[in-house]
Every structure is written in structure tokens, then in C-alpha cells.
Image: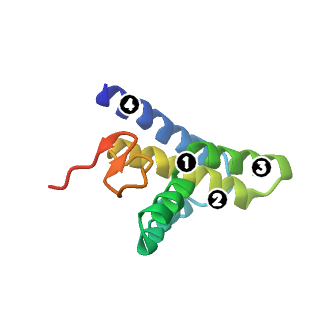
Amino acid sequence: MKNLIKIEEAAMFGFSIVLFNMTDFAWWWYLLLLLAPDIGMLGYLTGNKIGAFTYNLFHHKAAALLILCLGWYVGNVWLELAGIILFGHSSLDRILGYGLKYMNGFQHTHLGLIKSE
């Protein structure tokens, strides 16, 4: 099942690249901003509850799609870009095994426990 999820997430990551290709932004924007959503991890500096909330806010695909669609609706290319980046980043994270976080610690995700190696 984990491989099936990774394949699905890889397809969504590819779709984010297709969406980005439909914009007028230079490719370096995608590469520059792809890791930006990890700023949500800073919430863990104040504890697990706030950390899980901020991490999940920046890594929730529904939020990403809402921002993307809002950008399309109002004609704001920067909102479109933000939505595409959030969506692509979340898919990439899920390929790597980083899911949405539970409040009892960073390692506890909806995909299972992240194992430290």
C-alpha cells in the first residue's frame, strides 16, 4: 500500500509541475520556492500542538488547492504560484513519508511513524 501511495503522490507532484508550466514564471521560481512550505515547522519551536497546526496548515492539499483556485478566480498569479508550490511540496513530502502531523510529536503522521535512522 505504501508504494501505491508513493506512486499516487508522484503523479500529483508531476501534476504540480504541469500546472507550474502553465504559468509565465521562470523555472527557477519553482526550484527556489519548493521547500518554502517547510517554514510551517517553525511552529514546533513553541510546542507540539502549535507545531502540528502550523505544519499541517502549510502541508494540507485542500488548503493548497483553495489558494490555487482563489488565485485563478481573482486573477492573481502569485496566489496561483503559492497554491501550486504548496500542492507540489505536499506531494513531495508524502513521497518521502512525511504526512500530516498529529499533536503528540513531529514523528507521528497520518502515514505512520517516521522512523529515525
Which residue, as the protein is rendered here, is positioned at the far right? 74
Give how far apart the Cα atoms at labels 4 and 1 are: 16 Å
CB of mark 4 within 8 Å of CB of mark 1?
no
| Residue name at image x 62 percent, y 49 percent | 64
Q: Amino acid at mark 4?
A: Ile
| Residue name at image x 48 percent, y 52 percent | 89
Assess disc 4: are there few (<14), some (14-19) or many (≥20) residues with their C-alpha within 10 Å of its C-alpha.
Answer: some
Place of residue 34 in the rendered image (x, y in percent of width and height, measured from the top left): 48, 59
CB of mark 4 within 8 Å of CB of mark 3?
no
Q: Does dot 4 land on a helix, a strand or a loop?
A: helix
Identify the mark nearer the N-term, 1 or 3: 1
Write down the residue under mark 3. Answer: 70
CB of mark 1 within 8 Å of CB of mark 3?
no
Write down the residue under mark 2. Answer: 25
Write down the residue under mark 1. Answer: 60
Write down the residue under mark 4. Answer: 5
Q: Please, is residue 69 above or below residue 48 in the view?
A: above
Identify the mark nearer the N-term, 4 or 2: 4
Identify the mark nearer the N-term, 2 or 3: 2
